[in-house]
Amino acid sequence: MSVISINNVSAAPWGKPLLESINFGIEGGEILGIIGPNGAGKSSLLHLMAGGVNPTEGGITLAGVETANWKTADRARSVAMLPQQSTLNFPYRVDEVIQLGRSPHATGAQTDQEILQELMQLTDTLSLAERLYTQLSGGERQRVQLARVLAQVWRKEDASARLLLLDEPSNGLDLAHQKLVLSVVKQLAETGCAVALVMHDFNLLGAMADNIVVLNEGKQVRLGSPEAVLSPEIFADVFQVDVDIFSHPGSGTPLVVQR
Amino acid sequence: MSPANPRNTGVVFSALLLLLPAAMLLAICSGAAELPAGEALTALASFLFGDGGSQASVIVGKIRLPRVILAAVVGAILATAGAAMQGLFRNPLADPSLIGVTAGSSLGASIAIVISGSVISGISGVSLVSAGAFVGGLIAVIVVFRLATSSTGTSVPTMLLAGIAITALAGALTNVLEFYSDNATLRRITLWRMGGLDGANYQRVMVACIVGIPVLLGLPRYANALNALLLGESEARYLGVDLARVKTGLIVIVAFGVGASVALAGTIAFVGLVVPHIMRMTVGPDHRALLPASALAGALLLVMADTVARTALAPTELPVGVVTALIGVPFFISLLRQRGQYGMQ
């Protein structure tokens, strides 16, 4: 059974139709990449899956249950979302921000603390733990926010449905930290969590996604494996750019190079 | 190197828990008849448990004690409500008056003063002014809340703008009333607006406690929701916060608390803005610590300010709102100058 399944959904937040006839599901452990030009509806699609935008047509089921029947508090134990931009102007400490990711759960201080320590280690934020969020650089803030949403779905012995939604998670990160956080996301997916992520770096996405969905003007244009979806035709049609696609000499994953 | 930012929560709470009773005792000792601490305590014990017949015990028990308790409860309500509003609006400059409650209360009180000046006076006049202030504050908040609420929910930025608009409207109407008032009525309105605890008696203390206890116990129940709200509204929703319920709950509690405190003690500016700010610099922005710390510090500030107001120019009394500003502003400015160190922007 899919963790989330989107059946013929249209949505019009603020009265303007933004998404039309979207159809796909994400299995537990699957990583789904979402690509498309600016304004294609990628972020709206993530908010739709997170429950911040309601469908005007069609239905969404989370763990087999219509999302309309999920309570906000229950959903927060299963679904975590990293928005594109976060504005936090209050002087929380880094460990306090990440701790907020555990707030939907009643797992007890000790478990929360273990998860916190593990994630700070994995996202390289341990050395920032006692610093104030407001005094961090953009890339450091991004790692902290990532650690916060990871903490929300970081359960290992629990088999219940989990979904992590990431809007441009590698934004502002240097190469080493891009690699680091994406490997943490992969590690989470291996424990059975479904992941959907919006990214503009097609090479990183091609290397980590199991499937990619392409959006253009609110419509779903293509869905398939990275090898099948990342083609010169799609880039010409959707992004209006000419690209060459190579195969990575080591891993065999697609490499997109703009002409 | 990366500076550690220890949260001195334990130290701050211990200090507040020591200072508040000390300030209350000092307030009971001070006044036209100076009493040494021991004598004041004996008089208090005699009032509470004995016959309470001595002159000292009447002064302490009937005049000073209700006033000190009223100051503590009103200060605690204003500061806690301010902390909650700053969290809801995600703005450290927010204060409880933002949602229109203070201006609405002033208008309600002014109407009551104008009516009571011509119709009734004395004790019933005072209660009429309090009732007018309370009802005026609630009506203003209801209007602001309605203006900001549509089918998509309650918009906090719209609430801010509606609050400013309703505050301006209520202020204009109050000005019209003042313009057409005679000199005696005008003076009563002006004095009322400056705030004061000189009308304190046990009836008022009882009203303050009936409203204050639910407010002071109710707001901390929203601490986790407020913590999540600091990240942003959609982030809070995705952390499981029921936004509609939290916004409505917070506004209702703040409106009742601030409406009642304005009704009982007039408008006392500054406590709701500055106390939470100072507390955030010491215990951090976590509302589980911030709300109770603000309650204690707000009580402390208002008890101290009222003591100064009563004694500084005795036998004349200064308006307590003037004193809260005179005590609070220099302290606040000195903290603002070090704000970078506290991570405020």
Image (spheres, coloured by chain):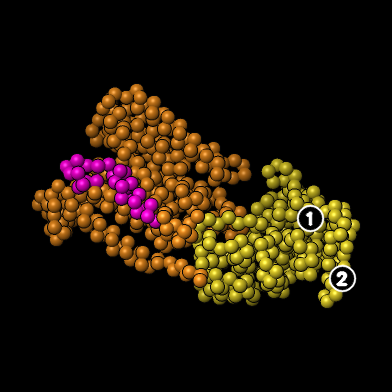
Chain colours: A yellow, B orange
Residue B224 visible, this orientation: no
The residue that appears at 30% across and 55% down in the rendered structure is B300
Q: What kind of residue is marked 1?
A: Gly
Is residue A48 left or right of A212 when viewed as pictured? left
Q: Chain of mark 2?
A: A
Q: What kind of residue is marked 2?
A: Ser
Q: Residues within 10 Å of mark 1 (few under 14, many from 20)?
A: many
- Rendered-image quadrant of the C terminus of chain A: bottom right
Residue A119 percent coordinates (x, y): 60, 72
The residue indicated by pointer 1 is A36
Q: Quadrant of residue A209?
A: bottom right
Residue toward you, A142 or B226: A142
Indicate which disc residue A247 carries: 2
Is B24 located above or below residue B193 in the figure? below
Q: CA distance from mark 1 to mark 2?
A: 21 Å
Q: Secondary structure at mark 1?
A: loop
The answer as to whether the residues below labels 1 and 2 share one chain is yes
Q: Quadrant of residue B259?
A: top left
- Rendered-image quadrant of the N terminus of chain A: bottom right
Residue toward you, A7 or A193: A193
Residue A189 percent coordinates (x, y): 71, 71
Q: Residues within 10 Å of mark 2 (few under 14, many from 20)?
A: few
Check whether the beta carbons of the residues at disc 1 and disc 2 lie within 8 A of each other. no
Whether B331 is among the magenta residues is: yes
Residue B168 percent coordinates (x, y): 45, 34
Is residue B160 left or right of B33 when viewed as pictured? right
The residue that appears at 35% across and 24% down in the rendered structure is B179
Residue A93 visible, this orientation: yes
Residue toward you, B332 or B295: B332
Residue B326 percent coordinates (x, y): 31, 47
Whether A120 is among the magenta residues is: no
Q: Which residues are magenta?
A: B309-335
